[in-house]
Amino acid sequence: MLGKKIPTLIALLLLVAIGASFWVWQRGNGTKTNVGKVPQSVKITNIADNKFSVSWTTQTPTIGKVEYGNVGEKLDKQKGDDRGETFVGQTHHITVNDLQPGTNYAFRILSGEGLQRFDNNGSVYTTTTGTTIASVPAARSLYGDVSNASEDTLVYVTMPDAQPASLTLNSKGSYSIPLSTIRSADLKNFVSYDPAATVVSLILDNGLTKSTVTVSTTNITPVPTIAMGENADFRSLPGKESPVTSQIAQVVPQSSETPASSIEPSQSQAQPLEIFNVEPLANPEINAITDGAYTLTNPAVEGEVLSTTKPEFRGTGAANASITISITGQKAVSDTVRISASGSWSWSPAIALSLGKQKITISYKDKDGKAQTIVRNFSVSAASATSEPAFVSTPSASATTSVATASPRTSIPATDSGVPVTGVITPMLLTSALGFAIMVLGAFLLAL
């Protein structure tokens, strides 16, 4: 009898070990971030009164989208790639349009088949649309062709004192962008430039290689053809020399990591033009906040008006430390939250806040062990308040984690490990089937 029980116990232990190994394997494979889909070189361009564009590259071809909404509200809208909602590539270019003038907007990037969320160091990306400009200058476009290139290529255009513009190559390797509708750096006017002497910089990026082109506005209709992967200077062409190009030497070809150069008529050397780059990822796994400073970034200012009764409060602090959050007003709410390893935290109240004035207090201990607080007054607007959270804690490039420990509410960690999605039935079925098989096999062995 004893001889039969020992093999049975061994078989049961073996089944438990197999089940545990499968569970660990499933967690490990389901939580690790695929580095190939991590957004790189994130840029905001084409800002107007009713739109803006977001672009980035990934190491491997994948799908990309943007979720967006007004700052302080839920990001409940999505927009796909300009080349099609299902476009798969290493470059991603999304234009968010039908927006309101002079309005602050927030967004996150969705990347990969599972549309994993990526943010900007624990916070959403933000941008502001310009005001409406009554008069539009005469139309003039910059256009040209790129050889050895596909539509999976981004084109960035920069001019002195102007907002950066961008677009993608079409299927024939051509591009065309209207210079007349590019805004000035302050967004208040359309950019002013000399049609015969302004230098324009172009950067071509297909996720694998880059090309830089420097060209005078004299030579933009068309810009001479360039081969992808090469750099070129077209400021001075035979028979088309501009007043500017006579003062300067040819630009030495630059590396693919350096923005193209530009000059103004009063200068004797080319000056670099910067594309607004909000690159979030020094390390593709974690956006480390190195100073450990304690901050409250939402609400960001004293007296800020929020338009949801369940706002997401966010900030930074020392990695893995704990803070206490207290909300006072018509309702009192408190919670203890652990700061993530990246140095950021986020938290939403379990109950809807009352309309009107509120106050949030963040309590923590500094590096010397002294108690400190951050106090900020805010209010919930009666005009458009909702009972939905302003932002949903989700997997992100910055591995934002919020773990509640002192109230009935349990915050869901917002990390690269992923968050279970309601309605996904496959893991439950697999677990149920595995458990049933173990029970049947165990009963069979016990009967032997």
Image: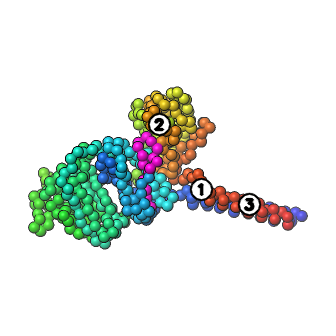
* Cα separation between marks 3 and 1: 20 Å
Name the magenta segment's main secondary structure: strand
Mark 2 burial class by Cα count in 10 Å: few <14, some 14-19, many 20+: some
> Most extreme residue toward the bottom, as rendered?
148
C-beta proximity under 8 Å, tags 3 and 2: no
Looking at the rendered image, the disc whose residue lies closer to the viewer, 1 or 2, is: 2
Which segment is the magenta one? Answer: 63-77
Q: Is residue 13 left or right of residue 242?
A: right
In space, the residues marked 3 and 2 are separated at their CA atoms by 47 Å
First-in-chain label (3 vs 1) = 1
Residue at 44 percent across and 50 percent down: it is 77
The tag on residue 424 is 1
Nearer to us: label 3 or label 2: 2
Q: Which residue is mark 2?
A: 385
- The image quarter in which residue 159 lies: bottom left
Percent position of residue 334, x then y: 56, 33
Please rate how many residues cluster around mark 1, counting C-alpha atoms within 10 Å: few if below 14, some from 14 to 19, many from 20.
Answer: few
> Would residue 76 be counted in the magenta stretch?
yes
Disc 1 residue type?
A: Val
Instruction: Please say if 16 is above or below 357.
Output: below
In this view of the protein, can residue 305 be seen by the observer? yes
Q: Quadrant of the C terminus?
A: bottom right
Q: Residue at x 78, y 63 (%)?
A: 440
Label 1 vs 2, first from the N-terminus: 2
Residue found at the far right of this picture? 1
Does residue 199 appear to the left or right of 448 in the view shown?
A: left
Which percent across, then down, holds residue 220?
Answer: 19, 62
Q: CA distance from mark 1 to mark 2?
A: 30 Å
| Up/down of 297 relative to 328, above or below | below
- The amino acid beneath tag 2 is Ala
Numbered tag placed on residue 320 in the rendering: none
Which mark sits nearer the N-terminus, 3 or 2?
2
